[in-house]
Image (spheres, grey):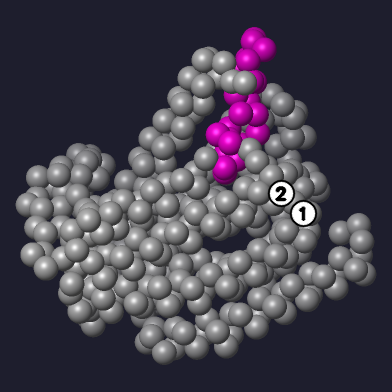
């Protein structure tokens, strides 16, 4: 049974993790606006604070002070509940990701684990919780009593159900290679070859399928059909304003961060940094620090990729989106499972 000190430490860890994640998400929005500005030959926000560094806090203040408008004909309870579901489903996955190995504080016997919770079915937990997020979007579209919002919600539900199949099947290869659903153990399995035994080298096809399906799951360009402004005004959140709109906005960027962390954990070795163990020695403070920084840098790479794609690719038509998911990604995901199973059969010590 946990003592009061253990409970306090877990509560502190959860608080620190959520604050760090929310800060990274806030500055991801700023980074996106600046990078898109560079791609499109404009400046982006650069007035509030040095280089626009305080822009996320100005945006938060704007959301807090804006008038909150609720449609008269909306189903109010569901209307208010939808953004909460979307945000909580995005946040709840943070507790199982290993941000780094256990760090031992120098000159003490205190060891700090860089993961909040460890359990055997962590990957299944992540997939289960993130799939709940579609209910927030679907209910938002239905409860607003707006036809554009309803179409956005229907598109979102069809899109997420379709691409979740390919996403889930793309991870079967990782499970077959690791033999476990525990994320920390999956990272440990990639620590060979001096920290370079990443699963992306064994199944590049699975990685590409995962990345494509994950972009569709987060409703980002070129798969942002549920909120296509040229067709549906703003899609499922057309009737939302002030902080309720901010929650949907926050959920989208947290989901981007979650997808990036999962890709890093499953395919890019997690917190494994090449030759870090050889240089610093496993279990040392510097090893833990370098590993944690390496994990964050890998996540930032994926976030940059998201932004780069948004500034580069056009949007699909909805029929193209569905055909791509069912006729291309799904068969490729099944092919990837067959290839990994064959490799494991031929090379049992893989």
Disc 2 crowd rating (10 Å Cα; few below 14, some 14-19, many 20+) is many
Q: Position of residue 89 (x, y in %)?
A: 42, 52
The range drawn in magenta is: 96-117
Q: Are marks 1 and 2 in contact (CB under 8 Å)?
A: yes
286 or 220: which is nearer to us? Answer: 220
249 or 86: which is nearer to us? Answer: 86
Q: Is residue 109 magenta?
A: yes
**Label at residue 186:** 2
Identify whether 37 is placed above or below 278.
Answer: below
**Magenta: main secondary structure:** loop
* Residue at screen point 57% across, 43% down: 97
**Label at residue 1:** none
Q: Quadrant of residue 175?
A: bottom right
* Residue at screen point 59% across, 73% down: 166
SS category of the residue bearing label 1:
helix
Let me know if residue 331 appears in the view.
yes
Which residue position is annotated with label 1?
A: 178
Identify whether 290 is placed above or below 220.
Answer: above
Task: Measure the alpha-carbon separation of dots 1 and 2.
Answer: 6 Å
Q: Is residue 210 left or right of residue 51?
A: right
Identify whether 61 is placed above or below 341.
Answer: above
* Residue at screen point 58% across, 36% down: 117
Q: Position of residue 5 (x, y in %)?
A: 53, 15
Of the two numbered discs 1 and 2 on the same chain, state the one appearing first in sequence.
1
Q: Quadrant of the C terminus?
A: bottom right
């Amino acid at each position: 049974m946990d003592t009061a000190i253990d409970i306090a430490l877990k509560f502190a860890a959860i608080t620190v993790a959520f604050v760090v994640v929310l800060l990274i998400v806030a500055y991801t929005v700023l980074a996106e606006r600046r990078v898109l500005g560079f791609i499109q030959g404009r400046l982006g926000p650069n007035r509030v604070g040095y280089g626009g560094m305080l822009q996320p806090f100005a945006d938060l203040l704007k959301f807090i002070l804006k008038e909150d408008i609720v449609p008269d004909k909306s189903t109010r309870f569901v209307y208010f509940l939808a953004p909460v579901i979307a945000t909580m489903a995005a946040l709840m996955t943070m507790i199982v990701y290993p941000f780094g190995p256990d760090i031992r504080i120098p000159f003490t016997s205190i060891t700090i684990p860089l993961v909040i919770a460890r359990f055997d079915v962590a990957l299944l937990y992540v997939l289960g919780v993130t799939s709940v997020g579609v209910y927030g979007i679907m209910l938002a579209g239905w409860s607003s009593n707006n036809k554009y919002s309803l179409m956005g919600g229907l598109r979102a539900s069809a899109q997420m159900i379709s691409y979740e199949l390919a996403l889930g099947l793309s991870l079967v290869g990782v499970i077959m290679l690791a033999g476990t659903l525990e994320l920390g153990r999956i990272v440990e399995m990639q620590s060979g070859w001096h920290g370079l035994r990443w699963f992306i080298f064994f199944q590049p096809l699975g990685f590409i399928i995962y990345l494509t399906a994950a972009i569709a799951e987060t409703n980002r360009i070129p798969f942002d059909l549920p909120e296509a402004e040229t067709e549906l005004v703003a899609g499922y959140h057309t009737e939302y304003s002030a902080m309720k709109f901010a929650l949907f906005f926050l959920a989208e960027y947290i989901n981007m961060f979650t997808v990036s962390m999962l890709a890093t954990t499953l395919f890019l070795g997690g917190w494994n940094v090449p030759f870090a163990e050889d240089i610093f020695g496993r279990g040392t403070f510097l090893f833990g620090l370098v590993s944690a920084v390496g994990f964050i840098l890998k996540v930032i790479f994926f976030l940059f990729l998201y932004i780069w794609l948004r500034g580069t690719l056009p949007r699909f038509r909805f029929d193209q989106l569905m055909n791509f998911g069912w006729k291309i990604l799904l068969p490729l995901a099944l092919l990837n499972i067959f290839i990994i199973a064959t490799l494991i059969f031929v090379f049992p010590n893989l």
